[in-house]
Each structure stands twice: as structure tokens, then as C-alpha cells.
Amino acid sequence: MKTYNIIVLAKQVPDTRNVGKDAMKADGTINRAALPAIFNPEDLNALEQALRIKDKFPGSTVRILTMGPGRAADIIREGLFRGADGGILLTDRAFAGSDTLATSYALAQAMKKIGDVDLIIAGRQAIDGDTAQVGPQVAEKLGMLQVTYIEEVLELKDKTITMKRRLENGVETVRCQLPLVMTVNGSAPDCRARNAKRIMKYKHAKTVTELQKENEDYTHMYNERPDLNIPEWTVNDIETDSSQLGLSGSPTKVKTVENVVLSAKDSKVITAADADIEAMMLELIESHTIG
Amino acid sequence: MNNIFVYCEVEDGHVADVSQELLTKGRALANELNCKLEAVAVGTDLKGIEKQIIPYGVDVLHIADDKRLYPYQTLPHTSVVVNLFKQEKPQIALMGASSIGRDLGPRVSSALHSGLTADCTSLVIGDHFDRKQDKKYDNLLYQIRPAFGGNIIATIINPDCRPQMATVREGVMKKEILDPKYKGKVVNLDVSKYVSDEDFVVEIIERHVEKSKINIKGAPIVVAGGYGVGSKENFNLLYELAEVLGGEVGASRAAVDAGYAVHDRQIGQTGVTVRPKLYIACGISGQIQHRAGMEESAQIIAINTDPEAPINAIADYVITGDVAEVIPKMIKYYKKNTK
């Protein structure tokens, strides 16, 4: 039976529901260290789609590719707990400050090192930016076809895949040939839960950097169990043109950032008196909020 | 060369609202930059489509008309736009932040190595001084958008790469015909020079487009009612206000459960999430589940008889009063102060 080689592009994101004052750095980029980090929700939908293909076609492999700081290895472990076979952490200071295009470039170069795959599956968008750009941008850089907003894979037969897309105003069923970059919608099925046995099996999965930090002598274990080593690629492990990396390789720059304080608004408290209501309506008309 | 381009989505012979809105914005930006506004329409049977596009003040409309170009598909539409942009070298390119624009935009930006800012809420022309390079940039496009779950507003610029690309959601900009008799040029593209047969690799087996009649998600103004509105009849006041302001009516879960409004109007964690310019919460206490679906609204008005309602904490205007008394006054003073 045919088996499939699948890469899931995933991102560790700051949990934007808990943003504090120190969330942004002076240069306008995100201070990730100050925020709780989670597996981007739609990337989990993407992982589930990959795992379903693996369920149907045993022998298929599902690996996670993520770019981020060292602690992003957490989401590779999370993926292992839920059924992935492995993952690669792309991490280097040279990638810091990347916009979506520079991110896509680095991911595409990493994909070139990984080699041919049947499917690259990503979440539609990440909650820290909501751009939905990285999937299509990676596809373009690799010269691959993309199909976005997938809700369900209806059929996979050899190289022919049939999928349901969920669009703003409807649905579309499309068929094409692999290889393919697919982005998955949040309306697709949720990812399966962590599996207790897999947690036991993979809780010690670590990157080299993490092993060095712990300074514990587990060397024998990692030699016997190569699947516990999470590969960690730096800029030296992939072929790159440094002018396309990181902050300097990003066409878009953050010029300014203003904080929006949601929780403690300076409310104007007014009464139902005519004068109050009219003054409010005038303010709203003047600020072009209405009218 | 160096003009502003708007990609126009065409569905069923109609130019999408979001594209019309961007044409209006594009015209204003073109005036400010003293350049031309150009548009591109890609599809099938586009004869006469210029009548829907040129009146927005479009100087040049490029049409790629081919029976294979509708419905939208990623690769052929990308090829048309990328090749056209390589040839025409626009300084700014705008697309709708729609299912199509969000599929096409990143593809095009990646091919042209150009920056793209998604979901802009405001587009402004401005200058920039780069201290590191000691270099001044004139007339850049400020791409302003909420980021980070709406907790910050970021101004993004694209100093060196062209075009400066941005997507904008439907309803964010206003559409306004400039001149029904505006004189613009139509250029019919030789599609075979822009698209190759290999671009047509996706087979669309079935397509079901349903325009939802209730569009609270895209509404710039939402008038939402809660259990405190009191009755289905009182909800009519909300419809009246929404109609006058050009908005839609939403409801809290409690109001839907009470039968005051249909489920399609429910806002909140288990309903729709809205981010309108203005959210008018009528008789809504503001439980966290409701707030999750509307707290990113740019401005919030809370009308409540209870001065301690949780919604008041996130409101810009807190009106302590009865919905049935306040709404008619809002309508009255809106009409009085607008033409």
C-alpha cells in the first residue's frame, strides 16, 4: 500500500489571550519570553489531518517542522505525544525578527534539505499575526501547488487527493495531484488528545541544546533511542542567502506600535438625557466611526 | 510604472464589495501620490465589467478574460498578477482580505519578494527615516493593523521592496463612485502570454457559494441586544438603529435562547466573533463568553440599566438608561447631525 511522507508546519505562539505590558520590545517585535507559549491552534488541526492520513495508510510518516527559539521544541514534543513520528526545530538568532516572507524563506530552505515529501500541511494562520501568509509563501518558494482552507480530506488515492475547502461564502470540493501544500482551517476536526503511552515514551525527547542545559548524564539513553533526539538545525545546516534572513531580510518593517489597553478603558459615563446622547453622536460622527 | 493596482474579485459577474472599497481607497491614495490608479480583473466572460470598475476613478483596467479563469484558482490567477506586476511595476498593490485575496496575496508577494501586510484597518501615506542607514524615505504606504489578538496597533512599512502590498477586510473601507463617466482605458491581456497550461492543475469538482443574508461579521457597526432588551418587539428598535447607521443586528446568547433573535446573529464564543468599528451593546451584561466575541471592537457603547454591568468596563461610552429610551434618541440625533 502507498505510504505518505508528510511534514506539518507548526508554530509556537504566544497565547494572545494573556498579553501583558512587556509583550513588545522597543523595536516593535514580540517579546516572546514574556508570554505563555502554546501550539498554534490551527496547526493542531493541521496535525490531525496528517495523523488521519497516517491512520489510513500505515507506514506513512508525520514530522513537524517549526522555526522558533529553543523552547519551541515544546511543540515538537507535544506533536510526538499526539502521534507525530518526529520533528525538526529550526532555530538561530539569524532568524530573529523575520516577517512572514523571511520566515517562509527559511522554512522553504529547510524543506529543501528535508527533501521530497508528498504533503506539507500547515494551519491556515497563527493567532499571533493572523496573516495566513506563510503556507502560500512557502508553497510559492518551493514551486509547489497550494490548496488553502481545507476542512476535510475526502479521498486520497495514490497521488490524487480530493478535499473540501471552507470559504467565506461557501464550500468548494477540489481535486489535484500530490505533492501539495495544504493549509487547514480551524473548522476542521480538533486534534486528538495526547496519548498516555506516547507521553511516557517521548517525555525525554530533547534537542541537543536542551540536553546540554540539563547537564545530566543520559547519554546512554539518547544513544540507544535515536528517536529521542530532536534535530536542531541552525542557519549553518541549511543553504541560505543571508540577505533574505531575519529582520534585515524582511521587506516589511514595524514602524511603530501602539498598545491598546482593553481591560481598563476610560469609559465616558453618560446619562440618557438628550444633551448627553447628542454629544456622543456628534463625537462618533466627527471621528468617522459612524456617518 | 509606479502606479497603484487593485486586484478586483469578480463573482457571478459582480465586482466584490471589498474590491470596490479598495478602488475607492486606491483612488484617494493615487491622488495623494499623484499617480494613476490601475485595476486588474481576472475571470471568464468579463465583457462590460469595466462599467463596474472605471467609475471608481480607475485610469487603466487590465482584463484577463479566459474560460478557464473562473472560478478562482491559485496558480493561474497568481501567474496573471505576477507577470502583470513584473511588467507594470506598481508601487502599491491592494487586495481584499477575503478567501481569494488571502490565498493570492501571499503567493504573489512571495514570487515578487515583496512584503505583504494582512488585514489592514487603515492605509496612509507617510515618510520614514531609517536611522541605521541614515536614509529618508518619502511617501511610503503606512499599513496599519491591529496585531497580537487586537492588543496592539502596528504601523508596518515596506521601505525597499515593491509593490507595497496590503490586504483589507470587507467593510473596513468605504466605497464611493468617483464619477460614473470617468474616462479610463481598458487593456485586454493576451492571457496565453501570462498563464501556462501547467497552471491549471486543480479540478474544481463542486462549488457551493452561499451569500449569507446576515453579515454581522463584516458589518462596520453592530447593534447587539441582550436579555435586557426585554422582548422580541423591543428588538425592532435595534433593527431600526442598525438600518440608520448602516450596521447589522447581533445578539447575546441569552437573547437568542430567549427567542429574541435567530442563532445566526449570536455573537460570542459560541457564535460569531466581530470586530466592528462600533459595537453598541444594548441590555447586555457582558459575560466573558460574550466579550470574547466582541471585545476587539474599535469602539463600544454599552446601554444598560445596571451601572455595574461587566460590559461597562470595556465600553468607551457607558449609558445608564433604558434601551427603549436611549435608542430613539440616538436615531434622532444621528439624523439631525448628518445630511
Image (tube, coloured by chain):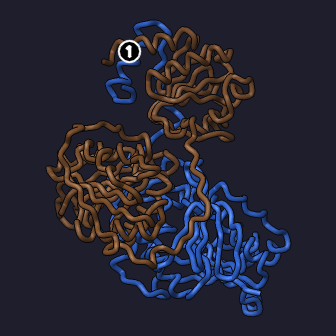
Chain colours: A blue, B brown
Q: Which residue is mark 1?
A: B335
Residue drawn where x is 54% and y is 21% of the image:
B239
Q: Is residue A36 visible?
A: no
Residue drawn where x is 65% and y is 39% of the image:
B271
User: Could you tell me which secondary element the residue under label 1 belongs to?
Assistant: helix
Residue drawn where x is 48% and y is 29% of the image:
B247
Residue drawn where x is 64% and y is 14% of the image:
B233
Residue farthest along the right direction in this orientation: A197
**Quarter of the picture holding the N terminus of chain A:** bottom right
Residue B230 in the image: state x and y as whole percent: 68, 15
Residue B138 in the image: state x and y as whole percent: 17, 55
Compared with residue B45, is residue A289 higher up or lower down, i.e. above or below?
A: above
Compared with residue B291, is residue B94 higher up or lower down, i.e. above or below?
A: below
Amino acid type, label 1: Lys
Q: Is residue B202 visible?
A: yes
User: Which quadrant of the structure image shows residue A212?
Assistant: bottom right
Between A154 and B110, the one nearer to me in the picture: A154
Residue B154 in the image: state x and y as whole percent: 39, 50
In the figure, is residue B137 to the left or right of B260? left
Compared with residue B162, is residue B94 higher up or lower down, i.e. above or below?
A: above
In the figure, is residue B53 to the left or right of A181? left
Residue B270 in the image: state x and y as whole percent: 69, 41
In the figure, is residue A207 to the left or right of A101? right
Between A26 and B81, the one nearer to me in the picture: B81
User: Which quadrant of the structure image shows residue B79?
Assistant: bottom left
**Quarter of the picture holding the C terminus of chain A:** top left
User: Which quadrant of the structure image shows residue A126?
Assistant: bottom right
